[in-house]
Image: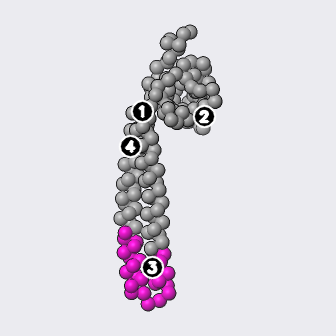
Amino acid sequence: MNETTSLQPYRQKATILRERAVFSAFITILFALALNGALFLFDQGISLLRGTQTWSETLIAIGLLLLGICLTGITGLLWISALQTMRLAWKMEKEGHITTGKVIKKTLTEEGKNRSYRIIYSFQEDTHFEEHLSESSCHALNIGDSVKIRFLSGHPDIARLEK
């Protein structure tokens, strides 16, 4: 079997860029809501601090301020991470190189009624990747078949199957 006939067509899920864009949009909305909530907590905490008469009111005010800071920090980190993964996905779409790799292993995982089909492939001797596939796509590929792979030249550890 030569290399051109061993390339098997298979359906690919939505591109990484689209998935990451939707995820980043969701995290951006979450971040905006968290900032709104944090501003409310800051406002309430400062208002309580200005008019505090007792230790319990002071502790509640400090608690509200700390909660607002934590809320902003955690969602801010999530937001930065989402934007970073979207940038990497965009880079993969625009600057990714296409090469051929080889299917090393096919696996089927069954948990009750759910089945998960995966293949393990590589395009370098020491770098292996695992990817979910549909049942028909997994059955269309055999161990040793060639597959098209998109990877980043500066980060060969970042790759995915290509149509």
Badge 1 local density, few (<14 within 10 Å), some, or many (20+)? Answer: some
Nearer the N terminus, badge 4 or badge 2?
A: 4
In the image, residue 159 sits, relative to residue 2, either above or below, namely: below
Residues at discs 2 and 1 in contact (Cβ within 8 Å):
no
Under mark 2, the amino acid is Glu
**Residue assigned mark 2:** 110
In the rendered image, residue 42 lying in the magenta stretch gets the answer yes
Mark 4 residue element: helix
* Circles 2 and 3 in contact, beta carbons < 8 Å: no
Q: Quadrant of residue 111?
A: top right
What x and y, as percent, mark residue 159? 51, 33
Q: CA distance from mark 4 to mark 3?
A: 38 Å
Real-space Cα distance between discs 1 and 4?
Answer: 17 Å
Q: Nearer the viewer, mark 1 or mark 4?
A: 1
Say if 52 sits above or below 86 in the image.
below
Q: Which mark is residue 61?
A: 3
Which mark lies nearer to you, 2 or 1?
Answer: 1
Give the number of the disc on residue 21: 4
Residue bounds of the magenta highlight = 39-64
